[in-house]
Image (cartoon, rainbow, N blue to C red):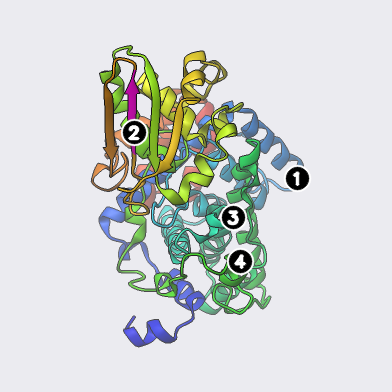
């Protein structure tokens, strides 16, 4: 693509052409290797979600809706209809809020494209290589859309992943259906009329955030099928007069960068910058969690008088406000979005994992008391949005003041999780619900995905519960 093409080509056309033309051999080796690790991480989290009420509820609802048995759901012998399976898998993958994040775009890329890729690849009897290419096309496009708005969706109360998933899934599903570039433009235009996902769940720890990428997968598959059948969609769903950027953002917010949608597309892979989470909490809190865990060893049971936490200013309304509510989380999901609780718990225990969101951990009297002493402020040294920096200043009763600032949060940039660490996280997550032997079969299938049929992966995911 030359500079002239970048200027005159509509964003939807650029993304459509990228998706239509992408072949797995065009993907840099490092990006492909990371893609498989991110898929593995997502599937491990999906299996873990089977042990939670929201996971069981999602599967029951999807089964009640389903009228066919085409596609696989993680750990379930019975297959469901394509859209129902995609919805259930998306809820499972994103449900723990432990999945990957592209920090600059502030979206969870894998859950925006993988559920549609799994379902459509199984339905079309695609190869594993075709599944991977479609997944990467959708995930990369989703990252570009998120990056173009510079966090603006979050500022007005939209969950960016919930919005982006509609477009990413449409491109993913459309590629596996063999749509040409014009049809993929139409699919994006159609998806523009379904894209939504409001953040009101933050008020009470509701489950709807978990559902957002699921509805995106349903809508994306629907849009792709409509486009395949000749249904016409608008060609400017992003930048049009009443397109996504005009209707979902507000004046005075961050500027939209249209060039982000197409500049270097296919050459400069944003997906390679995606971070995996070491903690099962909102990624905005991770810098502070790192700092708290590092300071834990220095506390030596000293009495803490007060804690000042420093987070990226644009994230405070999500993870620190209103303080009265954030200081007193009542559910695991409220705790995931409470900087006060996460910082307090990590300071006291030197860790924060899935078990630290269990009822007994949430009721920890010391953590709850300390959370009331945590005051959150804008971080003047933040590297946000490149990294989710964070810092702490802890005042002790003996007069000491302990300080720690983390510019590059663990899991990001030069602190990215190694393949060994990702595999270990997958095994720890998956074996909460399935035997180790089943988890190992899934691991081996994903790491060899470009060499096996998609149906083999689907069967492995269904049968993972067998020892």
Judged from the image, the secondary structure of the residue bearing numbered disc 4 is helix
| Mark 1 vs mark 2, CA separation in Å | 48 Å
Q: Position of residue 80 (x, y in %)?
A: 67, 44
Mark 2 and 3 residues: CB-CB less than 8 Å, in contact?
Answer: no
Which portion, as a residue range, is magenta?
A: 391-396
Tell me which label, 4 or 2, sits earlier in the chain: 4
Which sits earlier in the primary sequence, circle 1 or circle 2?
A: 1
Q: Which residue is mark 1?
A: 65
Residue at x 37%, y 42% (from the top left corner): 276
- Can residue 452 be seen here? The reply is yes
Q: Which residue is mark 4?
A: 224
The residue at the point 33 percent across, 62 percent down is 269
Q: Is residue 352 left or right of residue 188?
A: left
Quarter of the image that includes the N terminus: bottom left
**Residues under numbered marks 1 and 2 in contact, where contact means CB atoms less than 8 Å apart:** no
- Whichever of labels 4 and 1 marks the residue nearer the N terminus, that label is 1
Question: Could you tell me how far apart the alpha carbons at marks 2 and 3 are, in whole angstroms?
Answer: 29 Å
Mark 4 → mark 1, Cα distance in angstroms = 20 Å
Residue at mark 2: 392
Mark 2 nearby-residue class (10 Å; few <14, some 14–19, many ≥20): many
Identify residue for label 3: 158
Mark nearer the N terminus (4 vs 3) = 3
């Amino acid at each position: 693509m030359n500079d002239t093409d970048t200027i005159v080509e509509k964003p939807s056309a650029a993304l459509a052409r990228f998706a239509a033309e992408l072949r797995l051999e065009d993907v840099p080796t490092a990006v492909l290797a990371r893609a498989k690790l991110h898929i593995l991480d997502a599937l491990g989290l999906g299996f873990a979600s089977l042990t939670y009420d929201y996971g069981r509820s999602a599967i029951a609802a999807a089964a009640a809706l389903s009228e066919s048995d085409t596609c696989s759901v993680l750990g379930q012998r019975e297959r469901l209809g394509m859209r129902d399976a995609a919805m259930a898998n998306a809820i499972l993958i994103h449900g723990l809020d432990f999945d990957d994040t592209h920090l600059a775009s502030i979206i969870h890329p894998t859950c925006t494209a993988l559920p549609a890729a799994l379902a459509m690849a199984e339905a079309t009897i695609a190869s594993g290589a075709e599944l991977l290419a479609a997944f990467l096309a959708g995930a990369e496009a989703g990252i570009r859309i998120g990056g173009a708005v510079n966090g603006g969706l979050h500022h007005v109360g939209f969950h960016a992943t919930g919005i982006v998933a509609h477009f990413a899934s449409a491109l993913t599903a459309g590629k596996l259906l063999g749509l040409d570039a014009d049809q993929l433009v139409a699919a994006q235009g159609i998806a523009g009329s379904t894209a939504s996902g409001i953040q009101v769940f933050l008020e009470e720890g509701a489950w709807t955030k978990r559902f957002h990428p699921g509805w995106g997968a349903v809508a994306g598959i629907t849009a792709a099928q409509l486009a395949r059948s000749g249904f016409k969609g608008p060609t400017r769903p992003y930048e049009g007069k009443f397109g996504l950027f005009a209707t979902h953002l507000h004046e005075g917010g961050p500027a939209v960068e249209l060039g982000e949608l197409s500049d270097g597309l296919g050459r400069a892979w944003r997906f390679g910058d995606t971070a995996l989470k070491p903690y099962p909490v909102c990624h905005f809190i991770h810098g502070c969690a790192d700092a708290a865990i590092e300071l834990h060893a220095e506390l030596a049971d000293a009495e803490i008088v007060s804690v000042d936490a420093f987070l990226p200013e644009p994230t405070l309304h999500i993870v620190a406000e209103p303080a009265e509510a954030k200081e007193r989380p009542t559910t695991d999901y409220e705790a995931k979005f409470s900087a006060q609780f996460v910082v307090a718990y990590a300071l006291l225990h030197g860790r924060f994992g899935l078990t630290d969101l269990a009822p007994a951990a949430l009721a920890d009297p010391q953590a709850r008391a300390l959370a009331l002493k945590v005051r959150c402020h804008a971080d003047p040294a933040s590297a946000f949005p490149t990294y989710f920096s964070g810092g702490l200043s802890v005042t002790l009763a003996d007069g000491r003041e302990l300080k720690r600032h983390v510019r590059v949060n663990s899991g990001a940039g030069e602190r990215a999780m190694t393949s060994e660490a990702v595999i270990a996280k997958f095994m720890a997550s998956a074996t909460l619900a399935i035997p180790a032997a089943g988890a190992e079969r899934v691991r081996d299938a994903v790491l060899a995905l470009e060499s096996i049929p998609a149906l083999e992966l689907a069967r492995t995911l269904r049968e993972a519960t067998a020892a």
